[in-house]
Image (tube, rainbow, N blue to C red):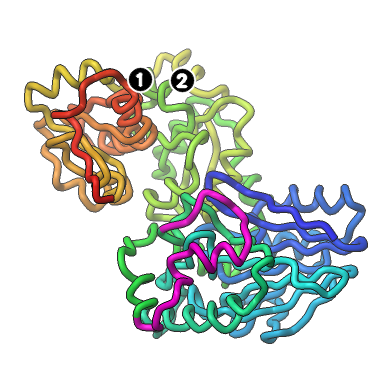
Amino acid sequence: MKVEQLYTGCLAEAAYYIESNGEAVIIDPLREVEPYLERAKADNAKIKYVMETHFHADFVSGHLELAKETGCTIVFGPTAQPNYKAYIAKDKEEFKVGNATIVVLHTPGHTMESTTYLLRDENGKDYAIFTGDTLFLGDVGRPDLAVKTDLTREDLAGHLFNSLHTQLMPLSDDVIVYPGHGAGSACGKKMSKETWGYLGDQKRTNYALRPMTKAEFVKEVTTGLVDPPQYFPKNAVMNKMGYESIETVRHKGIKPLSVRAFKAAWEGENALVIDTRHQEVFAHGFIPGSIFIGIDDNFAPWVGALITDLQVPILFVCEPGREQEVVDRLARVGYDNPIGYLEGGFNTWLAAGEDVDTVQEVNVTDIVELYKRNINILDVRRESEFNSQHVVGAVNFPLDFINKNMQMLDRDKQYFLHCMGGYRSMIAISILKARGFDKLVNVEGGFNTLMDSNIPKTDFVEQNTEL
């Protein structure tokens, strides 16, 4: 028996490949399915099932694509009602995979169809649980992401308490926990950076599994929840109702356009232009009106958080050779309408003599001197990061909510923006510039560079020692 975790860092998402005696199962695959097909081919194994732990909200799953490519059966847990052919399993139902067995454990709470899959080895011993968003390392799934339900988040949290205590905690301490996500995912709030562990360790260290009443649990898991990214419910609907093939999306999106054709599509299709290059490169020259979201960081989650229309036509600028990567990562979060890219990249735009914009930047040494002049500093990190430690006098202006909070700013004032490392502040500046703000300065390297410098911080940085 073989178990492999296929972890995707930008989404903090884990899919799983299980193989025994020539048969394989994929759990919670991403939309582009080539890695799973190649993995099974390498083992000369037939993919028998693709099992979904629930209707995912933070990415579009590849279950339909896998079923189309291999003829495997799509499996959901009890109460799931997908709008396509799938097998809806019963609680405690068993599935044979080679010499191994997978047992369905219905664990509602994160969503009502949420299901954990218990893997038993060839000897019938409980080996691992694939918990999806029911149980993470250090956390449990948030109870406010279910699609179209009359249940409150408190109701769902109550179901989650029952699921954990009746289905998972009675299992042996040496059972491996394979969760659907790790730290960085918005599907929980206190996830560990580790991506697998043992159930016994979770019983001892996970705040949500400590002895408490159901009422205490409900209060604990519903406290401190921030609004989920706006694309979450839209992705959940896509996973429930179905979606078009990723090959169709690629056919539309991997289309080279000359500068003239690019400009015509931008105007004619009322498209959004995304520049996916590194932030330092973007700062030195970009197409006026384009939005920076770099491919080398958390590209897909920030696209999902900031672009409210999943069907908006998208044109993009990227480094030559990375066109399919951009389209695939857009499709992972449901943005299925890319319509082409600038052939030859930004250099083509420069060679054509088109207008170019830049971002003014200062280093941390300069910002300390400027700070003495009572400048306006916007910290675009999340509220929790800001509360932990921040520059004295800075205003928290989280990138997550920039579209909602933009009216707070004065177009006549100059603002110095920073985040932790420079990625998010450059996104924020590009969005604000596209909306007509032009007195913006980026702090190179962000808060990390400031804290790592030799600059005295006693009167410059405020830290919350209670956090």
Q: Tell me if mark 2 has few (under 14), some (14-19) or many (20+) residues whose alpha carbon lies within 10 angstroms of its own.
A: many
Q: Which mark is residue 356?
A: 1
Quote the CA–CA distance across marks 2 and 1. 9 Å
Residue at point 49% right, 37% down? 297
The x and y percentages for residue 140 are 48, 67
Quarter-of-image position of residue 65: bottom right
| Dot label at residue 349 | 2
Q: Is residue 311 left or right of residue 429?
A: right
Q: Is 441 on the left-hand or right-hand side of 211?
A: left
What segment is highlighted magenta in the picture?
A: 190-215
For label 1, the SS is loop
The numbered mark, 2 or 1, whose residue comes first in the sequence reads 2
Q: Are marks 2 and 1 in contact (CB under 8 Å)?
A: yes
Amino acid found under the numbered disc labelled 1:
Val
Percent position of residue 279, x then y: 41, 27
Q: Amino acid at mark 2?
A: Trp
Left or right: 327 in relation to 232:
right
Q: Quadrant of the N terminus?
A: bottom right
**Can see residue 336?**
no
User: Residue, x 74% and y 84% (percent of image)?
Assistant: 93
